[in-house]
Amino acid sequence: MISQADRDLLLSHVRDIPDWPQPGVTFKDITPLLRDPAGFATTVRLLSEAAVGHDVTSVVGIEARGFILGAPVAYHLDAGFVPVRKEGKLPAETSSASYALEYGQATIEVHRDAFMPGERVLIIDDVLATGGTVRATVDLVRAAGAEVVAVSVLMELGFLRGREKLADVPVSALLSL
């Protein structure tokens, strides 16, 4: 459970950017949070707590802000880090999954050799919105024979009901907006 002081710290460093990347969408910008040493450290610590008791062997970061948050979480947990990227960005053989966004369609990929069967994976991202990106990531990890033990996000936009697509995996969000 996040303390009120931690919640206030995180919220004070998240700003809304209206009509980005397109009209009608309000983007949650976390760059002020990343710039603040206390805010960034608190975010990494709290996201890492989702792994307690799960014996995580790998942390997946979803492009792009999931990389920024996931890599230090992996370091903190003494686990490996695996990037899940937008289509066409990985150099070796990949597996892919397509999904709907709140404002379009996208495809993500992971290297086919990114996981060993039975690995225990924590998925990290900045925002859980409609759930499409995280759902696709869960499916990619499982298709590789690894186990998703938890999903941990900085923010959940509850009004978009993304958690409903993830009923088969534990999800924690530091902030629910």
Image (cartoon, helix red, strand yellow):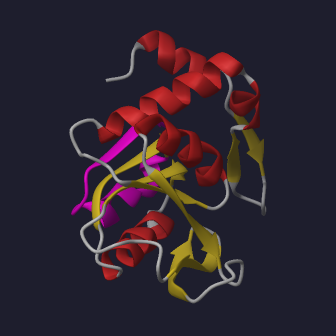
User: In which quadrant of the rendered view does residue 161 lie?
Assistant: bottom left
Q: Which residue is at the front of the view, 14 or 49?
A: 49
Residue at the location (58% across, 52% down)? 66
Name the spot of residue 1 as percent of width and height, x first.
31, 24
Q: Which residue is at the front of the view, 165 or 33?
A: 33
Name the spot of residue 5 as percent of width and height, x first.
49, 10
Residue at the location (67% across, 31% down)? 14
Q: Is residue 22 left or right of residue 63?
A: right
Residue 100 in view, yes or no: yes
User: In which quadrant of the rendered view does residue 89 lie?
Assistant: bottom right
Residue 174 in view, yes or no: no
Name the spot of residue 64 as percent of width and height, x first.
67, 58
Residue at the location (76% across, 28% down)? 35
Name the spot of residue 37 as percent of width and height, x first.
69, 20
Q: Which residue is at the front of the view, 107 or 104?
A: 107
Please tell me whether residue 40 is drawn above or below residue 3 in the rendered image: below
Give the residue furthest to the top: 5
Q: Which residues are magenta?
A: 157-177
Count of numbered marks: 0
User: In which quadrant of the rendered view does residue 163 lie?
Assistant: bottom left
Q: Is residue 79 left or right of residue 125?
A: left
